[in-house]
Amino acid sequence: MVLRTSKQNCVFSFFKCILMKLIIQIPCYNEEKTLGLALSYLPRKVDGFETVEWLVINDGSTDKTVEVARKNGVDHIVNFKENQGLARGFIAGLSACISYGADVIVNTDADNQYNADDIPGLVKPILDEKADMVIGARSIGKIEHFSWQKKLLQKLGSWTVKVASRTSIPDAPSGFRAFSREAALKLNVFNEYTYTLETIIQAGRTGIAVTSVPVRTNEDLRPSRLIKSIAKYVRLSLYTILRVFTIYKPFRTFFSIGLFFFLIGFGLGIRWLYLFFVAGPERTHVPSLILASICIILGFLIGTMAIVGDLLAVNRKLLEDIQYRVRKQDMEIKNKPDK
């Protein structure tokens, strides 16, 4: 074990910061009208980094998004021939950033919603080694172009994610966020709708250090493409949370559901016994007995699914560890200097 003095640590941190690379990624789908403005505000220099690069994920755009990106000096472009959705584009961006040697990755939107001047503050907790994932928290109540329904949904979604992830992120749906390389190597997104809620829950459940910093927003340039319908947004958000719970906490999820049905069946069974002995056998209450049997059997079956799900969760953790090691090894091979 090698021990360093405080002076040596300062020197080590100094040279580490000099050699670090930041890549700012922007998922895009038909963003020719707003992308140029968003890029014009992005920094090329950020304290703590030697290099700052830009990456655009073109998610099957049919307009001039790619031309605008190249015209404005974007360093890297990830192209999808067909629209894959925000979540897949986000993960593809992280993988590309890692392959290009990013130490820290910032994700922002193409509609210039987030103030790019807040990027240094967004990456600071990572540079200070206090977090591996940082969420830019907007002042939802002060954003004038957000309807009251949208504000309510944002707060409800954030509260639900807090409970599900055991984190204290006040603005879970925010897409303005920063990731260390280690966090990016570990993240997976199974949902095709959005990555915002799932990545926080996943981070909270897998031990990735998450924090948030306040950020500012700019003038609204276009309507949200994710929240086209309040009912649809609520449905998809609940589906995302339930699916993540099923993946990361299968035993608790299925056991709770199985216990619910078992208790209903048990209660109906007790009621049938009471009626059978009190009211007499001439009133058999067969429908109640059948319903009780169905609920008890269903409870046992779902309880069995809880055990199977728990075994699968163990295998998933092993596979995630293997995936992390493979990703890291690939990254080291790609970034290894030629002799």
Image: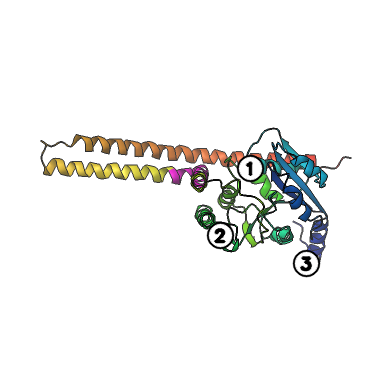
Report how far apart the C-alphas of labels 1 and 2 lie in the structure. 24 Å
| SS type, badge 2 | loop
Residue 6, labelled with which disc? Answer: 3
In this picture, is 53 found above or below 124?
A: above
Q: Which residues are magenta?
A: 237-253
Tag 2: residue type? Ser
Q: Is residue 332 visible?
A: no
| SS type, badge 3 | helix
- As for residue 238 lying within the magenta part, the answer is yes
Name the magenta segment's main secondary structure. helix
Q: 10 Å neighbourhood of mark 2: few (<14), some, or many (≥20)?
A: some
* Image depth: mark 1 or mark 2 in front: 1
Report how far apart the C-alphas of labels 3 and 1 lie in the structure. 44 Å
Q: Residue at x 63, y 45 (%)?
A: 187
Residue 192, labelled with which disc? Answer: none
Report how far apart the C-alphas of labels 2 and 3 lie in the structure. 33 Å
Q: Quick check: marks 1 and 2 in contact, CB under 8 Å?
A: no
Tell me the quadrant of the picture where the C terminus can be found: top right
Percent x, y of residue 127:
73, 59
